[in-house]
Amino acid sequence: MKSTRLSTLLLSLVCSSAIVSCVSNNQNQINDENSSLFVKTEGVIPFTKEMQRKWGAAVVADLDLNGWEDVITTQHGTNALIYWNEGGQFTDPTVLINGDTHGLAVSDYDGDGKVNIIVAQGGGDGGNPRRPVYFSVDQDRKITRLGTFDHFTPSRGRSVKFVEANNDEKLDLFATGYAPKKAKELTTNQLYLNNGTTFTDPHTLRKANDPLSMKALTTDINNDGIIDIFTFGGKDLTLSIGLGAGKYKDSTTELLGELAKTKHVNNITDIDYDNDGDFDLFFVRSPYQFEEEAYYDPINKNLAFFAFRDKFNFENINIEGNELIIENIQETYATYDIQLGKNRTVVTPERKEKYTGGKLVIKSEEAQGWPEGETLKGMHIGYMGDGTWRIGGYVKSRLSAVVKNVISQPEELRRKPLPAMLLENQNGQFVDVTKAMGINISEQTVSATAADFNNDGYIDLAISPYGNMALPVEHFVLINNAGKSFTKHANAGLISDEIGATGVGISTIDYNHDGRMDIIFGNERGRWYLAKNQLSERELGNYLTVKVTASPDKHAQPIGARVTISACGIQQTQLVGASGDGFHHMLNNRMHFGIGRCDKADSVQITWANGEQKIIKNVKAGASVSS
């Protein structure tokens, strides 16, 4: 008996080292500064190259159920677009909805075999509170607008998330909105139960003190199979623990303690970074863009600025040459004009499309002087003589632009450091392990996504920084060193082309099913990008995929299902629907697991939110299995 136990122990150690050795070997290879982890693609997804505003990360889901994940992007104030995946190449976009669209939630919540999309709508800056609209998508890609949830309380909609709150095989809906206390008619943190026909019986979960805490994360922090709900985004967080039967308990103080006061958590990514079976949390942190900013790049002579609902003024701007060139001019809604000189000549930026970045080229003689003794509304541009210009005024919304050929050092208004945080889940209590895990990100960050980019069996992180508006935004990757630490990749290859933008969102997708997790990233007032994982076979571990469908008995939906695999003595756990975006709920039910040098997974266990289970034994590396 002792001999048998010893043999089993030795076999386990050997198998475990297969994953660990893959980590150490790959770590040196993927940090080669001469090769990038990702390379930006051109034309695979035909994203526009025009600069646009965004709302959250790109949404990944197989909408037409053809086995290939499609992509939805939301252009804030303009539309939401669907790009259909046809075997690794995407179609031109189809418009899902026009207008002021916010959070999207994707799932077959009514169980009819068609994917549904719920869209939260904005409230017209508070003047036009609205209700979510909902759609169905056929397998032939016919999109049907089914209606509006007219029985919902109107709100300034922000986030929509599916939860299985009462184990009845029907997905319920959690919706947030911007609801300042003085606006008593507005709602947030509403849980609507699914009665099989519609969402009804709303009740309000714990609200944060700061109404800007209007993003949400749905995860299972105590491993009881019931989804729990965080809200965040402002100066504090809330945590509501699921009790079943549609009931939730406010556990903010009990389980978060002082962490509940963590300010400006922009997004939360749940990640089992140490493969211990529970979900840890990665906080990216930055406040909303509500204050004036200015950045200068002396090498390329660019001044980028942002103004928000207030006066702004940049004097003594020395320009090289006789023309002032301003690019990527964007205003949320152009309340006032752009005017030149003391005569206030009105000009209109050149744009290829509405609601995209505009451009002005102004000769000095066209903008002589500055209005005196008059109230300035909009953006005013004046030539003050001797190569010096002035830009200022007043806006009622958001205004941003990039001034070219600036040869004098202007005053900069930069954001202060605000470190990201990694919290380890220790039996439902969270401990800050950021420093212990070698993570040192001082700059502000806006989005993160989790995936095993080198297939070594440990989940890595890809992160969108807020960035410097005068420079291209450089998104980056933290490689997980076998759950012991993280290392920033030396050359992730996720550098944007445009300036005048800030990071906004990042998502993962294996768009061509080659076993490498790829990335979609985007920038506010900038572009969307698809970046292909270009690690070679020798740099990658093995992998397998698990497609989670409705449960075999009672047809519980995939959202909220837990998938656990065991390979070479190491277990990994992921949650269907998990993402690092606080506005959207994605249907990422094709789960990717790296398994290092292991040639198989001994078991794959799927546990749906209603408690049903399915176990698949001996899944070979490279295989794709379905529930």
Image (tube, helix red, strand yellow):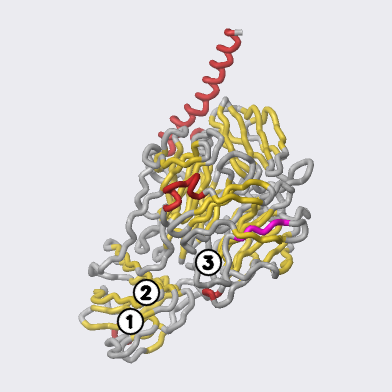
Q: Earlier in the sequence, mark 1 or mark 2?
A: 2
Residue 139 location (% of width, % of height)? 75, 56
Crowd rating for badge 2 (residues with CA inside 10 Å; few <14, some 14–19, many 20+): many
Q: Is residue 40 above or below residue 490?
A: below
Q: Is residue 146 above or below residue 20?
A: below
Q: Real-space Cα distance between discs 3 and 1?
A: 35 Å
Residue 204 location (% of width, % of height)? 60, 60
Is disc 3 placed on a helix, strand or loop? loop
Crowd rating for badge 1 (residues with CA inside 10 Å; few <14, some 14–19, many 20+): many
To which residue does mark 2 refer? 326
Q: Amino acid at mark 3?
A: Tyr
The quadrant the N terminus occupies is: top right
The quadrant the C terminus occupies is: top right
To which residue does mark 3 refer? 178
Front residue of 576/533: it is: 576
Dot 1 and dot 2 residues touching (CB under 8 Å): yes
